[in-house]
Amino acid sequence: MKLKEMCSYLDSEVPLSYQESYDNSGLQIGKADSEITSAIISLDVTEEVIDEAIRSCCNLVVSHHPLIFGVIKKISDASTTGRIIIKCIKHDIAVYSAHTNLDIFQNGVSRKMAEKLELKNIKVLSPLGHKLLKLVTYIPVSHLDSVRAALFEAGAGVIGNYDQCGFVTAGTGSFRGNDSTNPFAGKKGERHFEDEYRFETILFSHLKEKVIRALLATHPYEEVAYDLYELENEFYGAGLGCTGEFSEPFEERELLKMISTVFDINGIRFSKLTGKKISKVALCGGSGVSLLPMAIASGADVFITADIKYHNFFDADKKILLVDAGHFETEKFSSEILKDLIMKKFPKFAVRFSETNTNPINYL
């Protein structure tokens, strides 16, 4: 398989447009036309992980955390990142990362946490915004079905668990072509009236080019009239964090023990106990304490995330139990998500989990 085939699939399945502005998801190292035969999946890209890939003859590393994150002004063995890049290039190992886009997409990191805790009624905590477009175009009656089908095939018309969503209004369009035209209907130099349908549908912004290509390829007019509008609507199928509910409520200390067991945590930090039983849970893998106000507003009894600073614990203010379950611990199941995605599309491709523990934090 070509590396570009794998990247194209992952780029579309976990859209790069979902990532935060500061992020650097996607292909980090590699030649697009190179052949890949097997992959190793890890939370982080460390020297030990690359050594493991070399020993295992894996020429692709897929990670959650990007290897190249900040600005790199030089590549040398004086830095850890430089040594990893040099080793990858020397051994023809490609590196692909899906970071905040994996946090945000429909079946992302926080939802995986919720599933590990066996929560029910899982919903997005902070829905994805400013990623939806409305497409409006005008189609002659004879071509409505073919153009509409092409747009749906390109990914337009998806709203939540429904697809092929669109709206049609009948009307009359007019146009006049000059001497350089070859009009689909009517004559050059004469105004023509055509029975048309106004067709409108919705699409994600990362599909814009693909959908417009489909429109232009199937529409019979030389000049296709269409409008694209940015929507303020939030998409509740994707976003940061999530909430869920237990079938039966837990005592707070009982829940803390459960979290430690499920996520295999050697040390857990938490705010002052509220004295309430825990039924509704808010979660965000990694550094998600900025979502604390949303977690409280959602009515959650506990918010589980990581990288919580000292003063953040005061913000819980007995309104919610705030739990720091560790960055590595809350995101380590991202490897399962990535493997499942790859196997869904390429079931015969060799994929394995890294056996390297990349957690940089140790406990005494």
Image: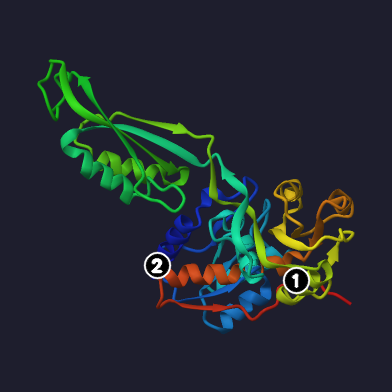
Element carrying mark 2: loop
Near-viewer residue (276 or 86): 276
Residue 50 coordinates in the image, percent (x, y): 62, 75
Q: Amino acid at mark 1?
A: Ile
Say which residue appears at 21% left-offset and 31% top-offset. 222
- Quarter where residue 193 is shown: top left
- Quarter where residue 146 is shown: top left
Q: Which residue is denoted by mark 2 in the rendering?
A: 2
Q: Residue furthest left?
A: 187
Foreground tag (1 vs 2): 1
Q: Which mark is residue 132?
A: none
Which part of the image, by quadrant, shows the N terminus? bottom left
Q: Which residue is denoted by mark 1 in the rendering?
A: 259
Image check: 141 left or right of 134? left
Near-viewer residue (9 or 79): 9
Say which residue appears at 80% left-offset and 62% top-offset. 323
The answer to whether residue 24 is above or below residue 251 is above
Image check: 360 left or right of 45? right
Residue 224 coordinates in the image, percent (x, y): 27, 31
Image check: 332 left or right of 88? right
Element carrying mark 1: helix
Sort mark 2 into few (<14), some (14-19) or many (20+) by Cα contacts within 10 Å.
few
Which part of the image, by quadrant, shows the C terminus? bottom right
The answer to whether residue 353 is above or below residue 142 is below
Near-viewer residue (85 or 127): 127
The answer to whether residue 319 is above or below residue 93 is above
